[in-house]
């Protein structure tokens, strides 16, 4: 059965990944609206705790068996998943959503760059870099970026890179069910941390419905879909496709949070989208999932 499940059209994991990205950016906008009530650490705890409960009920991770070679990647996957969420929410407290995701994208962009082998792969990565360069408010506007928030976004990007690499290795056998175990590992560390920082209001009945919506949109649904895509397309392609995240985040920020971008930044978003489309159009069918060279 596992072998048969991989005989899917090459475009299907791409569609799955796009749905995951739309979901996670909608969840991020909703999460930011909760910051005034419980703060970024509190929203992180809500998201991971409730998302983990959903994933555990669906996938029953205690039934999974991981080989000794998979256990360290699994641990790294879970810790990077939690740290990525925590750092990203700390970032968007003070940085616009689209800019924060653009900074965070340094992580998967690096994965795409170091995993590239064909000249055409570099074309799409370079186009994405150009888009990111003009998306960020550099030069005279750099003073408007909160440096602490920007640092948190870059740290989230480093965690994102680890998430991609370790997730492919940990989830190769069990697919999306691996997300439940990874989320459980993240919950052990970051739910107590977020609860401690947020206080008693965090688990009030009036907060829980919104927290549940964030958990579904930002954790349970997208990470399950990402794991399906991550174990069925090359890592470099996964990383390049994720270049659509800043564009989707900017759109979500405009629609739900009233955040705006100037004309130059909109053109930059178009460059990023073109890079993603180009990567998809030149994706080759491969009989095996590409392995990541980590030395």
Image: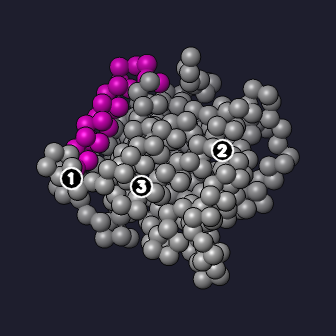
Q: Secondary structure at mark 3?
A: helix
Residue 91 is tagged as 3
Tell me, yes or no, whether the two marked residues, 1 and 2, touch with CB atoms within 8 Å.
Answer: no
**Residue 161 locus on image (x, y percent):** 50, 36
Q: State the residue lying farthest toward the left.
A: 140
Tell me, yes or no, whether the two marked residues, 2 and 3, touch with CB atoms within 8 Å.
Answer: no
**Residue 15 visible in the displayed image:** no
Q: Give the residue drawn at x 47%, y 45%.
A: 156
Q: Magenta-highlighted stretch: main secondary structure?
A: helix
**Residue 102 locus on image (x, y percent):** 35, 47
Vertical order, 220 against 154 (above or below) = below
Here the colouring is one colour
Q: State left or right for residue 15 relative to residue 65.
A: left
Between 248 and 10, the one lying in front of the other is 248
Between 178 and 201, the one lying in front of the other is 201
Q: Which residues are magenta?
A: 115-137
Q: Give the residue drawn at x 35%, y 19%.
A: 119
What residue does disc 1 label?
Answer: 143
Q: Earlier in the sequence, mark 3 or mark 1?
A: 3
Crowding near the residue tagged with mark 1, few <14, some 14–19, many ≥20 C-alpha atoms within 10 Å: few
**Distance of label 1 from label 2 (alpha carbons):** 35 Å
Quadrant position of residue 67? top right
**Residue 120 locus on image (x, y percent):** 35, 24
Residue 121 is tagged as none
Q: Nearer the viewer, mark 2 or mark 3?
A: 3
**Distance of label 2 from label 3 (alpha carbons):** 20 Å
Residue 78 is tagged as 2
Between 212 and 40, the one lying in front of the other is 40
Crowding near the residue tagged with mark 3, few <14, some 14–19, many ≥20 C-alpha atoms within 10 Å: many
């Amino acid at each position: 059965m596992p072998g048969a499940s991989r005989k899917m059209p090459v475009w299907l994991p791409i569609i799955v990944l796009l749905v995951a990205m739309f979901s996670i950016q909608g969840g991020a906008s909703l999460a930011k609206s909760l910051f005034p009530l419980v703060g970024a650490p509190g929203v992180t705890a809500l998201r991971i705790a409730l998302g983990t409960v959903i994933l555990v009920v669906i996938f029953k991770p205690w039934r999974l068996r991981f080989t000794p070679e998979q256990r360290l990647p699994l641990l790294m996957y879970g810790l990077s998943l939690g740290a990525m969420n925590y750092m990203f929410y700390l970032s968007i407290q003070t940085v616009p959503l689209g800019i924060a995701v653009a900074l965070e994208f340094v992580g998967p962009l690096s994965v795409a760059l170091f995993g590239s082998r064909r000249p055409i792969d570099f074309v799409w990565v370079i186009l994405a870099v150009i888009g990111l360069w003009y998306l960020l408010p550099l030069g005279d506007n750099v003073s408007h970026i909160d440096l602490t928030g920007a640092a948190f976004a870059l740290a989230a990007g480093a965690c994102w890179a680890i998430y991609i690499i370790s997730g492919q290795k940990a989830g190769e056998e069990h697919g999306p069910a691996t997300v439940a175990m990874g989320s459980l590992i993240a919950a052990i560390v970051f739910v107590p941390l977020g609860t401690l920082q947020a206080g008693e209001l965090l688990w009030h009945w009036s907060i829980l419905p919104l927290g549940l919506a964030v958990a579904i949109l930002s954790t349970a649904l997208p990470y399950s879909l990402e794991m399906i895509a991550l174990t069925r397309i090359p890592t470099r392609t996964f990383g390049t496709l994720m270049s659509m995240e800043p564009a989707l985040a900017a759109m979500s920020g405009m629609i739900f949070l009233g955040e705006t971008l100037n004309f130059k930044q909109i053109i930059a978003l178009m460059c990023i989208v073109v890079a993603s489309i180009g990567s998809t159009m030149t994706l080759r069918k491969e009989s095996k999932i590409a392995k990541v060279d980590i030395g």
